[in-house]
Image (spheres, grey):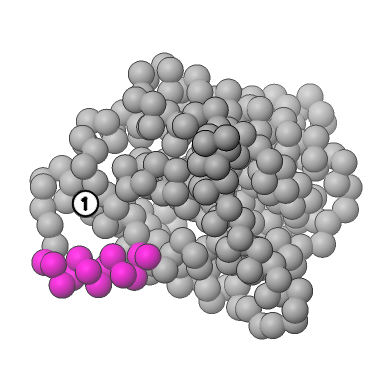
Amino acid sequence: MNLALTVLNVTAPVFLLAAVGFAWVKLGFEYRVEFVTRLAMTVSVPCLIFVALMQTEIAPEALATLSMASFVAYGLVMIASATLVRLARLEVRTYLAPLIFGNTGNLGLPLALFAFGDVGLGYAVVVFAVMAILSFTIGIWMVAGAGSLGKVMSEPLVWATLLGALFLWQGWRTPVFLTNAIDLTGQMAIPMMLITLGVAVARLETGAMTRAALLSLAKLVICVAAGGAAGVWFGLDPVAAAVLIVQVATPVAVTSYMIAAKYGADAEAVAGLVVSSTLISVIALPLILAFVI
């Protein structure tokens, strides 16, 4: 009973805030996703990442190990997903990237914070940064046929990660007034991203949900197995391993839909993956948390 209550306390705020965004759209109110997403990804999320890394009590060696484990986990997911797409004779540029990259920002960061506190958030931002780097390079190449290292280096969240890692390594701290300002800016990231997630899902129109649901289940199994295998392989501590599994197993990100639409892939099919995997995660993520907590 206590475990069930703990898991409910962790997951309920996440889905309640997403429900706020969902209801907001269904009630006919205006919500500019592009503006909010740009604000989050260029200002609030980088601030959140920088402060989380600068103030973390986690040893730099542990974060470095988690970074390597994250790359390996996503590598395993890529191999398994590519095999699945080939065997199912699906279009690679439409299905492969969404099956690999999950919603580690909007959903993964809040779950890690609520489940494991500031330590979990410190671990989660590392996995999020790894995913973002892979998504902006290999992920875009999968959809568009061309990656962009320059785009990666122009992303504020990448620089926030590098600066945060440098401050952590050197033991530096920003002045208190500046830290408070950056921290306050970063605090708006999580509720803003969750509400935006609900808005984006509410606006999606999908078809062929049976295929999307089956692929979403396959993605979940692959990601949990890959995250668990990488955690064992690198000997991560229980919290780091749990965060890695949860982050890798998050549902298909709404940004996958936006990228598919931008580069001419089948955006409708990707929308189906977003909706089905997000709905499945309502049940799956609490079960995963119940197992790893």
Q: Is 17 positioned to the left or the right of 59 in the image?
A: right
Image height of 159 relative to 168, above or below: below
Q: Residue at x 54, y 76 (%)?
A: 35
The three-letter code of the residue at mark 1 reads Gln
Whole-percent x, y for residue 208 in the image: 89, 47
Residue 105 against residue 142 in the figure, above or below: below
Q: Residue at x 67, y 46 (%)?
A: 282
Residue 50 point in image, percent of width and height: 28, 56
Residue 290: x and y, percent?
Answer: 55, 32
Q: Quadrant of the N terminus?
A: top right
Residue that mark 1 sits on: 55
Left or right of 126 on screen, residue 111: right
Residue 228 rendering spot, x and y as whole percentages? 50, 23
Q: Is residue 58 left or right of residue 78?
A: left
Quarter of the rendering containing residue 116:
top left
In magenta stretch: residue 183 = yes
Local packing at callout 1 (Cα closer than 10 Å; few below 14, some 14-19, many 20+) is some
Q: Main secondary structure of the magenta part?
A: helix
Depth check, front residue: 120 or 82 = 120
Instruction: Please say whether residue 28 is one of the residues in the magenta stretch.
Output: no
Q: Secondary structure at mark 1?
A: helix
Q: What segment carries the magenta color?
A: 175-187
- Residue 202 in view, yes or no: yes
Rendering quarter of residue 154:
bottom left
Q: Residue at x 87, y 41 (%)?
A: 210
Q: Is residue 64 above or below residue 195?
A: above
Residue at the image point whose x is 38% and y is 26% from the top: 238
Camera sees residue 200: no
Give the image quarter of residue 4. top right
Q: How many marks?
A: 1
Left or right: where does residue 40 sit relative to residue 46? right
